[in-house]
């Protein structure tokens, strides 16, 4: 079974692309959702977070996401510290999940696939790309955020050109090229790679 990553900058549409693969019967592991779950359920991870960010970070056993966000999004060092605690737990969880799947390939959807080191454990990576103005517009509408807020988040991510160069396959989600035919073609390519593995 092949382990495939799917990544892209904020607003690129990687979740939309992942949903199309799911319709084709391919299981998708969402790293963001998993990280949120693990920060509430994994006792070892919870202890590590409390040790670094204080007991106040959990209220009644549940992560106080706003409290933690207020700390990490004002300090690059604190964000890096949080990522260094959460990424290994998410990577281990993803690997265990992928080993349980029985399909020719599985997908791991993650914004920070290269930054976290997770890409090294995958066979191939799909990059979803879209022009920056379109990505900005999508996120502003989706999150009801200001242009400045979205720009700040975009600027914290790896440069999209660099990220896309690291990917094995590219899907362009620019609302000019049809998305589903691109996914179907890539699905066939990956199936044949999985057969020949």
Image (cartoon, rainbow, N blue to C red):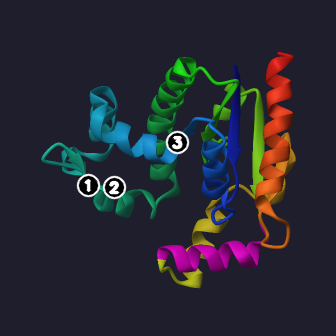
Mark 3 vs 2, N-terminal side: 3
Q: Secondary structure at mark 1?
A: loop
Q: Is residue 111 visible?
A: no
Instruction: Identify the residue under disc 3.
Output: 31
Camera-side mark, 3 or 2: 3
How much space separates mark 2 and mark 1, taking CA atoms? 6 Å
Instruction: Identify the residue shown where x is 52% and y is 19%.
Output: 100
Q: Which stretch is magenta?
A: 130-143
In the figure, 18 relative to 144: above or below?
A: above
Count of residue discs: 3
Q: Is residue 47 magenta?
A: no
Identified at 17% across, 42% down, the residue is 61
Which quadrant would residue 4 be assigned to in this image? Answer: top right
- Any mark on residue 68, and which? 2
Return the residue at label 1: 64
Q: Would you say the residues marked 1 and 3 are in contact, meaning their CB atoms lie under 8 Å apart?
A: no
Quarter containing the C terminus? top right
């Amino acid at each position: 079974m092949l382990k495939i990553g799917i990544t892209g900058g904020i607003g690129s549409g990687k979740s939309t692309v992942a949903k199309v693969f799911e319709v084709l019967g391919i299981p998708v592991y969402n790293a963001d959702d998993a990280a949120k779950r693990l920060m509430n359920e994994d006792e070892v991870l919870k202890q590590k977070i409390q040790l670094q960010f204080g007991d106040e970070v959990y209220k009644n056993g549940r992560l106080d996401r706003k409290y933690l966000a207020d700390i990490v999004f004002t300090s690059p060092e604190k964000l890096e510290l949080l990522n260094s605690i959460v990424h290994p737990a998410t990577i281990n969880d993803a690997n265990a999940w992928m080993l349980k799947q029985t399909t020719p390939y599985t997908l791991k959807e993650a914004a920070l696939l290269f930054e976290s080191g997770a890409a090294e454990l995958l066979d191939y990576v799909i990059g979803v790309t879209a022009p920056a103005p379109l990505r900005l517009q999508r996120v502003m509408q989706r999150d009801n955020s200001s242009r400045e807020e979205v720009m700040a988040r975009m600027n914290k991510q790896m440069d999209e050109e660099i990220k896309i160069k690291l990917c094995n396959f590219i899907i362009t989600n620019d609302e000019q090229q049809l998305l589903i035919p691109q996914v179907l073609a890539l699905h066939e390519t990956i199936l044949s790679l999985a057969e020949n593995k």
